[in-house]
């Protein structure tokens, strides 16, 4: 868990992207955000939608490792953080992740040859975490689609 404190200092006069579009790499994320908001998710149509803060509640985001483990049945949520305001913003994310040495591989119950063919090759969370962070900092591939290029099985 970590606590993110965005100090506004009155500088965010216009809406500004403070965390670029991405998906989380862990299993899932539980997020608390204060009443300032700022979290946006991308709709299927590509439009950014505000996630309105609700008092005494948490947001749960599916992440890439769970997407791979579920054979794509759960979709990782592409999101970003924008901010416009005079007040500081606080958010508290908690990242649930697989054990580092755990092989992430969709169970047989989630795979069949016709409707749900296997979509991802097996990988360990430690490998995926290391490689996705290297990719993020080298900007070789779009971090939003990294799990597809990293472990996706092509069907063509």
Image: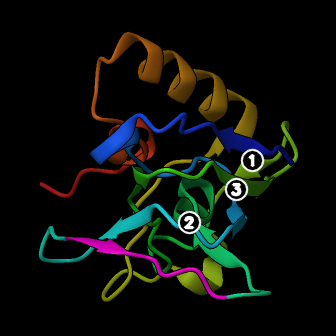
Whether residues under marks 2 and 1 lie with C-beta atoms below 8 angstroms apart, the answer is no
Neighbor class of circle 2 (other Cα within 10 Å; few <14, some 14-19, many 20+) is: some
Task: State the residue in front, 99 or 155.
Answer: 99
Q: Quadrant of residue 66?
A: bottom right
At 33% across and 39% down in the image, what residue appears? 149
CB contact under 8 Å: marks 2 and 3 = no
The image quadrant of residue 143 is: top left
Write down the residue under mark 2: 36
Residue drawn at x 52%, y 29% is 132
The residue identified by callout 1 is 103
- In this figure, which colouring scheme has been used for the structure? rainbow
Give the percent coordinates (x, y) of residue 141: 28, 27
- The stretch of residues the image draws in magenta is 48-54
First-in-chain label (3 vs 1): 3
Q: Nearer the viewer, mark 3 or mark 1?
A: 3
Per the image, the residue denoted by label 3 is: 91
- Residue 140 in magenta stretch: no
Between 132 and 37, the one nearer to me in the picture: 37
Q: Nearer the viewer, residue 104 or 64?
A: 64
In this rendering, is residue 147 above or below 139? below
Residue 108 at x, y percent in the picture: 63, 77
Of circles 2 and 1, the one toward us is 2
Provide the secondary structure element on which disc 2 rests: loop
């Amino acid at each position: 868990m970590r606590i993110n404190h965005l100090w506004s200092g009155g500088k965010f006069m216009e809406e500004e992207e403070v965390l670029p579009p991405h998906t989380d790499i862990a299993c899932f994320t539980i997020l608390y955000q204060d009443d300032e908001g700022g979290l946006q998710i991308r709709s299927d149509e590509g439009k950014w939608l505000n996630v309105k803060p609700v008092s005494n509640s948490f947001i749960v985001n599916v992440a890439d490792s769970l997407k791979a483990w579920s054979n794509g049945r759960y979709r990782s949520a592409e999101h970003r953080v924008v901010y416009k305001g005079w007040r500081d913003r606080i958010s508290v994310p908690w990242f649930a992740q697989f054990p580092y040495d755990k092989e992430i591989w969709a169970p047989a119950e989630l795979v069949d040859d016709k409707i749900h063919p296997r979509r991802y090759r097996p990988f360990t969370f430690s490998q995926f975490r290391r490689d996705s962070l290297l990719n993020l900092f080298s900007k070789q591939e779009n971090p939003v689609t990294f799990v597809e290029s990293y472990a996706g099985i092509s069907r063509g």
